[in-house]
Structure formats: structure tokens, C-alpha cells
Amino acid sequence: MVVVTVTDEPKARTRRKRFHYIREGNLLRHISKYALREVKISDEKSLKIKYEVPIESIKGKEVYEFDFTNSGNFGVSKYNSEELLKGSCKAQNVDIAELKRLEFEVENNRVIMLIEEVLKYYLPIISEINDFKAKLGINYIFASPRVSDYLRDIKWGLASSLCNWPEKARIGSLKQVTKLLHQLWTIVIFHEILGVTKIEGNELVFKQQGVNQKQVTPASVFVDAQGNYWTCWYEPQEIKEAPPDYKGPLTPLFEGGVAWKRPDIIISKGKYKRLIDAPKFDILIECKNLPFEEWWNKGKVVGEQLLPYKHLFNPELFIVASLKPVPDWAKDKLEKEGFKIVDNFYPSGEGVIKFEKIMKGAWI
């Protein structure tokens, strides 16, 4: 029996990753399903898995190789399985048109549910983001590689998530990218409600940035229908002296100060280059795209996240925007703490109307 070795690299010291699949008709099945044995080579920051595969089990079939570069960019190539016998495989690139004819084998119910949600909620979200980009003549949306994959094409984006292995890794990728897409769409909706007429530089900067708020670049600086300037920041991190009534965690990095996990979206009326230039923050929006029970976390989200955000940034308006429904008792609890709750917040969802009413009531 002739055995070949195929090596996946789920984790590296950079963002590099590699996964292998065998094509069965129009189905892509992970190489582990054919392996007699697997050998893991790992340390704290990297992991390689060598699969020992009988060549007869994959003879005459194509091997699809899914790669992520050191910078996180995604690509797909393929070659005949017999190439593995040569030690060096002659591969050809796979384009979106070919990927659209293929499906990944999925056996995990959670993954299946998340894929269904991508098609139900995030396909319209992607369409609205791309329509906004075209309408405003935005040259580029600076986003994470995975968000860019989904904005390029839903099938290409799904492939960049579903090529991960095992199924748990697929869940992590899908949850992360859908969270980011919901946040980006929220920024887009805010622009549209205020009747954006121009975005400075014709670009959106939708990337997490460093802890030093002096260097944080706005996600956008735009002009509304009334000629007012607005500045939006995506996931800025505030470092400042703790207010007297602050009960959140203190950071060990700065004596007498606090550093807290970044809120999703901060908005100030006016035109500013840096976060510290804004005299105040008018709006803070925290997006929640998971089911209520998951992000509510038995109520811990209030004391461990929302109230610390409120104390640190002191926005005039604080909105919790949930894609999924929020029970009335939780809305009452949050509203008593000074938060505005918008649920069912997705394209064509009733939350969009409520979000618009809140914004127009406060600022138009």
C-alpha cells in the first residue's frame, strides 16, 4: 500500500494557514476523512497536522488547497492527487466561478445553522454595503481580509470560513466575520439615515487599531444632508483616569488608569483627525449579532461591558443594536440604566425603523 503525506497548517506564527480537501463530485471533503493516521507538530504559536493517506483512496480525484498568506489573504488552488507521489505538486488557481459549483461537506448542526443565517441576514447586509459603496463612489473599504472576501462574493467569503478545519474552527470564523459585517452595516445605516452627501477621502477604515488612541484613524468623516460634519470611529480604545464611580477592571499597564475592551462604534458631531480631539462623544453603538442568551451572558454584559463603556466614554446616546430579538424584561433593565435598545436590527427588520426614529429624533 502506497501512503502519501498531506500537511495542513491550521495555525502559524503569522496569519498563514493551509487546509486540504478532496473533491467528490461537487462535494469538498476534508483530507482527514481519508487518513490512516495523523501526526500533530505544535508549539504555543503554531500547529501542523500531517495526514498519512493511502493514495488508492484518493486516486483519480482532485486535491483542493486553501491557503491564507502571512497577511491573511485567501486563495485556492487544485491539483490531481497523483501529483502527491512526486513530492512537488503542480497546481492551478481556482476562481470564484468554479467555487460556486462546489459545496463543503458539513456535519455539524451549529455550522449548518450559521450558514443558513449568512444567507438569510448577511447576504442582504453585504448587498446594502456594496450598494452604499457604489452610490457614494467610495474608492475602498479598508476591512479585515475575511470581511473583504465576503464583500467580494458571498461564495468566496463562505469558502474562506468553511475551509477551516475542524468544524469548531469553522464556527469561530463564521461568528467573527458575521459580527464584523453587522458592525460595518450599522455604520453604513447611520450614514444613510443622516443623508450623507460626502465622505472625506472616499474611503471607510473598518479595521481594529492600536491601543494608543492618539493614532486611531476615524472610520469615516462625512457631511450630512444639513452640511454638518460627523466623525465615526470603529473599535477605538480609551485609556484614561478612572472616574470616581467606575467599577470596571483596572489595567495593570497604566498606574491609576483604566483600559477597557473597545466599544464597537463611537460617533462625534464635527470633524476630527484623532479620538482625543473630540470634545465629547455624541453616540456609542454596541452591536450584538448573536442570540440574546449568548451575548447577555446571564446579565454579566451590563456590569462587565456596557456600564464600563458608558462611564469611560460618557456618550449622550448609547444604543445597543441587536440583530436577534431581546426580551421585554431585558429591554426594561437596560433602559433603566440609560441604554436605548434596538432589536431585530437587520435589513428589512423592524429595528431599522426604530433606529432611524432614534437618530432623527436626536439629531435631525
Image (tube, grey):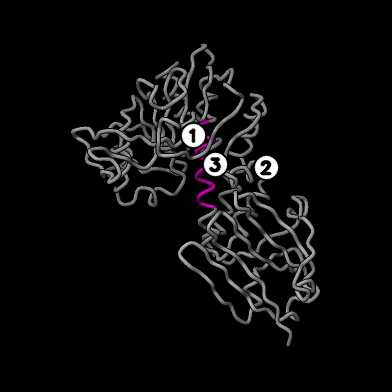
Q: Which mark is residue 350?
A: 1
Q: As shown in the figure, which amino acid type bears the numbered disc 3?
A: Leu
Q: As shown in the figure, which amino acid type bears the numbered disc 2?
A: Arg
Quadrant where the image shows the N terminus: bottom right
Residue, disc 2: 152
Q: In front of the other: label 1 or label 2?
A: 2
User: Could you tell me how far apart the alpha carbons at marks 2 and 3 are, in whole angstroms?
Assistant: 13 Å
Residue, far top: 226
Q: Residue at x 78, y 76 (%)?
A: 59
Residue, disc 3: 181
Measuring from the top left, give residue 226's x and y in whole percent. 51, 11
Measuring from the top left, give residue 199's x and y in whole percent. 57, 22
Name the secondary structure under disc 3.
helix
Q: As shown in the figure, which amino acid type bears the numbered disc 1?
A: Glu
How would you classify the magenta stretch by its main secondary structure?
helix
Q: Quadrant of residue 32?
A: bottom right
Measuring from the top left, give residue 195's x and y in whole percent. 55, 19
Q: Nearer the viewer, residue 67 or 102?
A: 67
